[in-house]
Image (cartoon, rainbow, N blue to C red):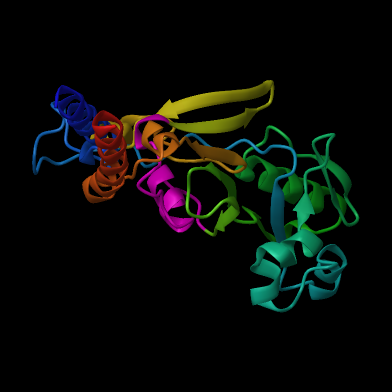
Amino acid sequence: MRTVLGLLIIGLVLMVSSCVPTRNITYLQESPTVKNDSLITIQKVQPPYRLQINDVLSIQIKAPYDPELVSMFNVGTSNNATTSNSAGGLYFSGYTINQHGDIRVPKLDEIKAIGLTLEELRELIEKRLLAEYFKPNADLFVTVRLGGLRYVMAGEVSGKGEQTIYRDQVTIVEAIANSGGVPITGDLTNVRIVRQYPDGVKVHHLDLTQLDVIYSPYYYIQPNDMIVVDPLPQKSLGTGTTGLASFTTIVSVLTTLVTTVLLFTRL
């Protein structure tokens, strides 16, 4: 009898420990520093992004008074807006920053782009065009944009692999939602962002279950970020992610154990 009682106690302990607490799978929970219904002020204007190796750029040059000269610089640019703005289209018609940090622009040859902001690169290209090809009254108009905000999802997520969002600013919550979200077995309390910097790679940790995360300087992702979500310990236990699943599994195991014990005690 004591053996059966001991098995029941062990089963209850395993069931409680194997269930995933709601607080570990709920995004942006309120905290003492953020009161209920209070206005939350966040810094939506992030520091300008500095271009990195492998970034893909869309560069468009317009001059209504000299269209023939403009056509020399827009070589390879598709006339189909949908194709040219897609990730696949920009791979062929866009400008990729090579391993030396340069892009190759028709007639301008190589331009050092790494470390510049989009605005700085635009001004540099415009300055060279005006100095070497266009007249001051040409009404030159240059636009430089990233070919989408590309990032990679890895770990315990619904959609793994490279993702692209065509916006200038994207939060980590939006990035995860865009890839299908995190299943119940994913650990939201320690989401890692693996980010590239000119001098190497750094890892930043975020707790997405706390509303305070919106104040983090890493709440907005950057191009080429890798977002990694680790699995919860409950997944490795294999006893189930919900109370019902755990209960069903443990009852089955306990039933087998009790039956075995009773058979041996009667022999």
**Which residue is painted at 78% across and 53% down in the image?**
95
Relative horizontal placement of residue 177, taking residue 196 as reference (left or right): left
Q: Position of residue 137 (x, y in %)?
A: 72, 62
The percent coordinates of residue 217 (x first, y second) are: 41, 30
One can see residue 75 in this view:
yes
Q: Is residue 22 above or below residue 115?
A: below
Q: Which residues are magenta?
A: 167-190
Image point (68%, 26%), residue name: 198
Q: Measuring 49% from the left and 41% from the top, which residue is drawn there?
A: 221
In the foreground, 94 or 123 = 94
Instruction: Find residue 21 and report its image quarter.
Output: top left
Judged from this view, the residue extending furthest toward the front is 267
Where in the figure is residue 60, as x and y percent of width and height?
71, 62
Question: Is residue 222 or residue 1 the one in the foreground?
Answer: 1
Count all numbered tags in the image, as a single digit.
0
The image shows residue 201, relative to residue 169, as above or below, that is above
Task: Assess whether residue 168 is covered by the magenta stretch.
Answer: yes
The answer to whether residue 81 is magenta is: no
Quadrant in the rendering for residue 232? top left
Residue 2 versus residue 122 in the image, above or below: above
**Which residue does the image show at 33% across and 45% down from the upper left?**
240
Residue 142: x %, y % from top left: 68, 58
* Quadrant containing the N terminus in the rendered view: top left
Where does the C terminus fall, quadrant-wise? top left
- 225 on left or right of 97: left
Residue lying furthest bottom in this view? 80
| In the foreground, 206 or 126 | 206
The one nearer the camera, 151 or 52, is 151
Horizontally, is 104 left or right of 174 in the view? right
Using residue 30 as the reference point, say whether residue 203 is left or right of it: right
Is residue 61 visible from the viewing direction of this image? Answer: no
